[in-house]
Amino acid sequence: MAIPRKTMRDIRTLSGKVDRIANPYMAYMQITCLEMEKARRGRERASALQRIGNLDGRLRDIEAEKAALLRALAERGAAPGVATPGAAGRPTPPRSGGGFKLRY
């Protein structure tokens, strides 16, 4: 059984194990990075809340418009799900399974 060769990657050092508290500048840098991330996340949160407010407003507008259209249909005497007289005489076009085709 051969002994594996040791390379530079196999040498163990303590260079990456410096305690952040031992060097105060490293701790302050970490605090600074955390504060910057906190500020960015705060702006992201405010933007997301604004978008949610815009979406909620649009959904309310859609429901109001839908209710107005249904009211107008009810006043004309057409109940939802009932075909109008003009649409009953029109045949439906045949459906093809292949999608649309272009001719050049």
Image (cartoon, grey):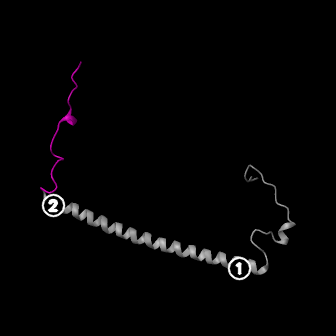
Tag 1's secondary structure?
helix
* Quadrant of the snapshot with the N terminus: top left
Q: Residue furthest top?
A: 1
Query: Which sits earlier in the primary sequence, circle 1 or circle 2?
Result: 2
Q: Which mark is residue 85?
A: none
Tell me if residue 55 comes above or below residue 5 in the rendering. below
Using the image as rendered, state which of residue 56 and residue 47 is in the foreground. Answer: 56
Q: Which residue is mark 2?
A: 25
Residue 17 within the magenta-colored segment of the rendering: yes
Q: In this image, 70 relative to 27: left or right? A: right
The kind of residue tagged 2 is Tyr
The part of the chain drawn in magenta is 1-22
Q: Which SS type dominates the magenta stretch?
A: loop
Q: Residue furthest left?
A: 22
Residue 16 within the magenta-colored segment of the rendering: yes
Using the image as rendered, state which of residue 96 and residue 88 is in the foreground. Answer: 88
Q: In this image, 64 relative to 76: left or right? A: left
Place residue 34 in its image quadrant. bottom left
Q: Which residue is mark 1?
A: 71
Residue at (13% x, 60% y) in the render: 24
> Alpha-carbon neighbours of circle 1 within 10 Å: few (<14), some, or many (≥20)?
some
Tell me if residue 55 comes above or below residue 3 in the rendering. below
Residue at (59% x, 77% y) in the render: 61
The kind of residue tagged 1 is Arg
Q: Nearer the viewer, mark 1 or mark 2?
A: 1
Using the image as rendered, state which of residue 9 and residue 82 is in the foreground. Answer: 82
Residue at (85% x, 67% y) in the render: 88
Tag 2's secondary structure?
helix
Residue at (26% x, 62% y) in the render: 33
